[in-house]
Image (spheres, helix red, strand yellow):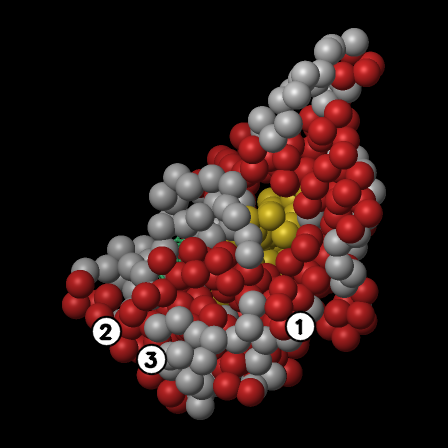
Amino acid sequence: MTLRETLARVAAASPSAMAQARAHQGRLTKPPGSLGALEEVAVRLAGAAGVSPPPMPEPAALAIFAADHGVHAQGVSPWPQEVTLQMVANFLAGGAVANAFAAQVGASVTVVDVGVAGELPVAEGLLSRKIAYGTADLSQGPAMTVPQAVAALEAGIEVASSLVASGARCLITGDMGIANTTASAALICAFTGRDAARVTGRGTGIDDTTHAHKIAIVRQALHANGLPSTGLPTPAPAESGQGSPGGREPLEVLAALGGFEHAAIAGFILGGAAARVPVILDGVIAGSAALAAAALAPAAIDHCVAGHRSAEPGHAAALDHLGLRPLVDLELRLGEGTGGLLAHPLVCAAVRVMHDVATFDSAGVTEKQS
Ligand SMILES: Cc1cc2ncn([C@H]3O[C@H](COP(=O)(O)O)[C@@H](O)[C@H]3O)c2cc1C
Ligand SMILES: O=C(O)c1cccnc1
């Protein structure tokens, strides 16, 4: 499916399914509201599916989108670029944290090369959708051309559609790309209007000097791409329809500042939303990609659940802008889909309540008196 067709298919949550889900929650044998945020998760999934109770969000499929970044040359990450390719091999061999967590929660793992700067062997579980051998350096000009960004978005859409066609009923976002927290911070600045100093984090672990340099690189990237560096927030998707930083098209902003994996994750979100299959978002890379997806199709966010809040400061800013509440906060700062995977059993439990728990009527339990 093309980007245009997918955008046309993304539908907003159904208010009547949400109202039915809320009413059903009120009849279950528990004090009203006693399941806290999990009640809202079930209502959200009912709205997204257009039916209450919503289908169980399983089986789950994790897609890890991998790519390299020209901005790595600016010294924004302490890790060499070849770690991206080496970690792809590790995912395929089953040796990464994402593999352990996926095994724990029963999710499948698909790895997608959308722009790794090196040759990967043909392997089971690896989809080759390479657009280029890494992006250009966003601090010098656009990281991608608009056609490259569209190709990456469409790769993400295709992966979402094919996972759903093979039976997945919940999609989980994953990323791998050394230096991708720099691109994430730049996207978050552009789409939320926050200052680089507030949203740029330490990624895989950098000292104060490198952190100050990374903030300067994010500012330079906004400047080099003709985008405002502070104070011009795009309206939140719920209020606005489309967000367009500095009057620029969302697609242009994504191409200027994003990585191939950011664009592919945005497409994966749109593909899930178009199929009405829920998408659990992982950390700051997914959060920044979701800002782009929301700018392209605001209703896509109705189909997303924020799996966790990462330790990267920009992640909270992105979630705040999107109006998403993270399910867990374990100070994770890994990516790969790890925080999204850990949230999956919680999302399943929230929906199972709607299917399995008795009502006051059916169980003969007396309701609250006043
Ligand atoms: C061994 C290793 C495994 C990883 N798995 C995910 N990331 C995460 O860290 C990287 C982003 O951080 P920065 O912007 O600081 O480079 C991305 O690859 C992300 O997926 C990893 C990083 C490393 C080093
Ligand atoms: O928030 C994340 O997912 C994250 C943080 C640091 C490094 N890589 C990923």
Identify the residue shown where x is 38% and y is 87%: 223
Which structural element holds mark 3? helix
Decide if residue 309 is in sight here.
Answer: yes
- Residue at label 3? 219
Question: Mark 2 near mark 1, Cβ–Cβ under 8 Å?
Answer: no
For marks 2 and 1, give the one nearer the viewer. Answer: 1
Disc 3 and disc 1 in contact, CB within 8 angstroms: no
Tell me the distance, in whole angstroms, between the alpha carbons under discs 3 and 1: 27 Å
Where's the N terminus, which quadrant? bottom right
The percent position of residue 333, horizontal first and vertical second, equals 37, 49
The numbered dot on residue 241 is 1
Rendered location of residue 368, percent (x, y)? 67, 17
Alpha-carbon neighbours of circle 3 within 10 Å: few (<14), some, or many (≥20)? many
The quadrant the C terminus occupies is top right
| 156 versus 340 height, above or below | below
> In terms of sequence position, does the residue under pointer 3 or pointer 2 come before the other?
2
Q: Is residue 2 visible?
A: no
Q: CA distance from mark 3 to mark 2?
A: 10 Å
The type of residue carrying mark 1 is Gly
Residue matched to label 2 = 213
Single out the residue that lies furthest toward the top: 364
| The disc label shown at residue 266, or none | none
Residue type beneath disc 2 = His
Front residue of 146 and 23: 23
N-term-proximal mark, 3 vs 1: 3
Q: Quadrant of ligand 1?
A: bottom left
